[in-house]
Image: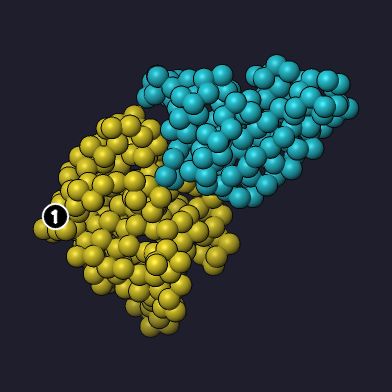
Chain colours: A yellow, B cyan
């Protein structure tokens, strides 16, 4: 299923978050195409704000209520947030941290220390072991289960596969995407493979079809209006 | 031809971060180079191809969408094998990693961002080896 959102539309941010929250289910691997780095930043920042910051507020409220009621919390798991993995390729991990802080995510380091927010340079998660990213996500999935968290959202820029170019580029990418099933029963990971539009448009229509495994994978294209004729 | 009329050493700068492009362009212009700067690597490549012999060095970011610095390096060397290429990155990318993954690419140097204009100028001069091609009287700052 393909969804198209234009960034200059009034409710584009909300549309993107609805896609993350309502259309992408746990256990699904999906594809997001973003038009530029600035938009990618907006997308992950909004997601982190909506999930980690609101979860933290809820946690604080629950603690206050429990203190007021003088009772112990027996639903500890409910207030725990998802683990969010951000693996950028066109900006550094420090840049992501700075951006989150600058745009209203308080105590980014605290979120990292608590294990709710994980950041990894996409290059070093794919190289030298191309299975490195999958191993990282699997370990986060296991960790989330052990900690009683709702799951993991993995926002992974796959720009690595476009770094070296050449004939093997599409083959390696298709092989990677093929290893990520569109839907895994009982999976707790929302996998979002993120493509910069400048890279995505270098692929053939056949390659794009193979990436989505015959459109079995959900695809969100975030486009700017000026890209339309 | 007097020194004053010698062509300037012409550089092509490519980085998808417009702030970096501006800072580098201004600094290198001030240090006596002729500079064409682009944030879009496709446009940079077009510019290079249109007058390949005039460029003596290409300074490019590595991680750019549509054409990475590695691909750009390969393409400009195909057009003009004599042009020097320096890749720059804000990321940790060790030389041995690079040569292991892409042994066929010929790159003349790497620089780690952020880099000062003086250090960058020294690096460029050491590669092009011709200070006379800069404007007479220019100083490295």
Q: Quadrant of the C terminus of chain A?
A: bottom left
- Which one is nearer the viewer's eye here, A37 or A225? A225
Q: Nearer the viewer, residue B3 or A19?
A: B3
Residue found 26% across the figure and 47% down from its top? A204
**Residue A55 seen anywhere in this rendered image of the structure:** no
Quick one: SS at disc 1?
A: loop
Identified at 23% across, 51% down, the residue is A205
- Label 1 lies in what chain? A
Residue that extends furthest to the right in the rendered view of this protein: B137
Q: Say left or right for A139 vs B50.
A: left
Q: Residue at x 51, y 40 (%)?
A: B46
Q: Which residue is mark 1?
A: A214
Total numbered circles: 1
Q: Position of residue B78 (x, y in %)?
A: 46, 24
Q: Is residue B115 left or right of residue A154?
A: right
Residue B74 found in image quarter: top left
> Residue drawn 74% across and 32% down?
B33
Viewer can see residue B45? yes
Q: Measured from the top left, where is residue A219 in percent x and y?
A: 25, 61
x and y, in percent, of residue A36 in the image: 46, 56
Q: Farthest residue toward the top?
A: B129
Circle 1 packing at 10 Å, graded few (<14), some (14-19), many (20+), is few
Q: Extreme left residue here?
A: A185
- Of the pair B78 and A218, the residue shown nearer to us: B78
Report x, y in % for residue B39. Answer: 56, 47
Q: Is residue B37 above or below residue A62?
A: above
Left or right: residue A86 versus residue B125 is left
For the N terminus of chain A, give its image quadrant.
bottom left
Q: Residue furthest bottom?
A: A69
Query: Is B44 left or right of B132, judged from the image as shown?
Result: left
């Amino acid at each position: 299923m393909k969804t198209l959102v234009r960034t200059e539309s009034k409710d584009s941010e909300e549309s993107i978050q609805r896609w993350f929250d309502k259309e992408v289910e746990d256990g699904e691997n999906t594809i997001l195409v973003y038009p530029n780095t600035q938009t990618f930043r907006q997308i992950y920042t909004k997601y982190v704000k909506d999930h980690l910051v609101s979860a933290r507020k809820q946690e604080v409220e629950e603690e206050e209520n429990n203190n007021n009621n003088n009772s112990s919390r027996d639903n500890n798991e409910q207030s725990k947030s998802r683990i969010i993995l951000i693996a950028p390729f066109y900006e550094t991990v420090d840049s992501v941290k700075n951006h989150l802080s600058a745009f209203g995510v308080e105590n980014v380091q605290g979120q990292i220390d608590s294990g709710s927010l994980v950041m990894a340079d996409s290059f070093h998660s794919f190289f030298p072991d191309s299975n490195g990213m999958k191993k990282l996500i699997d370990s986060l999935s296991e960790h989330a289960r052990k900690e009683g968290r709702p799951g993991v959202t993995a926002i992974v820029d796959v720009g690595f596969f476009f770094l070296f170019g050449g004939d093997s580029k599409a083959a390696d990418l298709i092989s990677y995407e093929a290893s990520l099933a569109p839907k895994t029963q009982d999976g707790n990971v929302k996998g979002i493979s993120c493509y910069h539009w400048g890279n995505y448009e270098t692929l053939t229509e056949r390659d794009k079809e193979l990436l989505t495994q015959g459109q079995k994978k959900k695809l969100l294209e975030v486009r700017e209006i000026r890209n339309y004729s | 031809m007097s020194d004053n009329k010698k062509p300037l050493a012409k550089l092509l700068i490519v980085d998808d971060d417009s702030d970096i492009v501006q800072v580098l362009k201004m600094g290198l212009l001030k240090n006596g180079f002729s500079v064409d700067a682009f944030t879009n690597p496709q446009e940079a490549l077009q510019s290079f191809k249109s007058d390949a012999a005039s460029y003596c060095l290409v300074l490019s970011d590595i991680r750019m969408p549509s054409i990475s610095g590695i691909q750009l390096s390969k393409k400009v060397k195909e057009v003009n094998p004599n042009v020097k290429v320096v890749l720059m990155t804000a990321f940790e990318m060790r030389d041995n990693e690079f040569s292991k993954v892409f042994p066929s690419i010929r790159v003349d140097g790497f620089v780690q961002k952020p880099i000062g204009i003086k250090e960058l100028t020294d690096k460029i001069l050491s590669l092009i080896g011709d200070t006379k091609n800069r404007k007479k009287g220019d100083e490295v700052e």
